[in-house]
Amino acid sequence: MKKKLIAGILAGSMLAALAGCGGGETDPGAADSPSGSGSGGVIEITIPSYKTGENVGAVFFEPQVERFNQLYEGQYKINLESVPQDGFNDRLKQLAQQNMLPVLVQGGDVDWMANIAFPNGMAYDLSEWLNETPAVKDLLLEDGLEYCTNEDGSIYSLPLATVRPTGFFYNSALWDPQEDLSAMSMDEFLTALGDQKIAFSTAENGWVAALFLTALIAEEDGGVEWLQSGVETKITDFNTPIFINAVARLQELLQNNAAPNSIGAAYADAANSFMSNQAALISNGPWMSTDFAETNSANWSNGFNGADVRASLFPGQVGIANTACFGEWWISASASEEELELAKAFLEFVYSPEELEAFLLAEGGDAPKLEYSDGFKAQQGETQVLADLAADTTEETVFAPCILDMIPASVANSDFGRLLPSLADGTYSPEEFAQWMTDSATAATAE
């Protein structure tokens, strides 16, 4: 799945626009710039990040940056500019227009990166560095490396070394089937589920419902391939038996198994429902494991006990994850030689075995090409849900990308969740839901 670079008129017009914003005249020490070199021999930069403050990602990321700063004290230093997650992509685009991208860029809007930032020379080519740094390259996911490698061999986004397949958590105090749930078929799973309640969310982007829908699609014949077809070009036609059959099953779950507050619930409402014994199941990623630790017991109620929670991948050994994708980090092409040294040192630090293991212990997941230390294996086993997911993630695991990532962003972020209540109350049939999704996605891509 190699990305094609867009050249010609697009490149020329974009670069001209950047030049018109005074790119070559920007004061590198200006207050609005997120980057800049320090004095006294310390190379110092500032990068915008949403993984700060109260954001769940800050729990691991802020200490990680501090560890890097301590390791390279007197040589390198990274400061973080806190940016709200819902405004982060716009912040990057604004900085790009001002020719002031940070030295280290923490992702961004996928379409913007693929169609604007990378084709127009905003990113540093990592291919030579990776060839010279096998300690990093040898850990990269093959699908991700292929996806991030362009036809000319250049690599702008550093591919991932970890995968965090999403499954579901269940409260064994309410439902304890004593079986390998991921090894079941979907029919067997739903039969075993019976009338147990699922904590769904239908507001915002309908996150929890979207995860279950993804698993239901993946169980259909050709479903995984249909989802994967949206990696390169967003899915806009939903009038297929694969989607309609999966929506029909989701409709039944919403009508028969949804926790009492599911309709109109945001994710926080769904999480609260699960952690107050109002639902036996909730789907979410391994990062939710920290919610079940005793240190977070203030968020529990009605006798809920995090120690009772177990985890599983979905029936059919399905883990929701997209491994053919851009990674989290890239480097600005405008970085100075000194700043490049810092950026490369940080990426090598983040991809070191110690930091990868620390990340997996904090947020869950798997690094398939990393040989785990004995200490890591022992610590991972201390968190039951992470141990459960690790045991389920094998060579037989089927990775399916979440449907929200495979459809136009406007449909995924608001339209999908907005119509879920109409599916739940029967106002829309699965066929009508599919047609509505098709109309919305087609309109979105025509804009």
Image: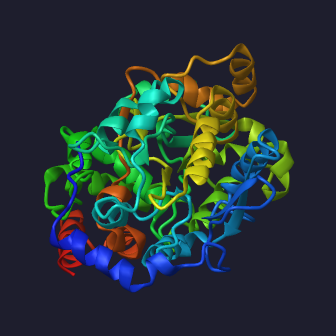
Residue in the foreground of this view, choosing between 27 and 255 = 27
Q: Quadrant of residue 323 in the image?
A: top left
Residue at 44%, 58% (x, y): give it. Answer: 333
> Is 225 drawn above or below residue 438 in the view shown?
above
Query: Nearest the camera: 61 or 67?
Result: 67
Q: Residue at x 68, y 43 (%)?
A: 289
| Rendered location of residue 47, percent (x, y) | 63, 63
Identify the residue shown where x is 34% and y is 59%. 118
Q: Position of residue 426 (x, y in %)?
A: 32, 71
- Extreme residue toward the top, this view: 374
* Side (left or right) of 198 relative to 435: right
Q: In which quarter of the view is residue 22 placed? A: bottom left
> Can residue 256 be seen in the rendering of this structure?
yes
Protein image colouring: rainbow
Q: Residue 386 in the image: state x and y as whole percent.
A: 64, 32
Q: Between residues 141 and 97, which one lies in front from this camera angle? A: 97
In the image, residue 281 sits, relative to residue 189, either above or below, namely: below
Taking the spot 43% from the left edge, 41% from the top edge, the residue there is: 159
Quarter-of-image position of residue 378: top right
Which is more toward the observer, 86 or 119?
119
Please indicate whether residue 276 sits to the left or right of residue 230 in the image.
right
**Residue 446 location in percent, x, y?**
17, 78
Q: Quadrant of the N terminus?
A: top left
Figure quadrant of the C terminus: bottom left
Looking at the rendered structure, the number of numbered marks drawn on it comes to: 0
**Residue 232 vs residue 340: left or right?**
left
Residue 445 is left or right of residue 347, and the answer is left
User: Against 211, is 203 above or below?
Assistant: below
| Residue 314 visible in the current orientation | no
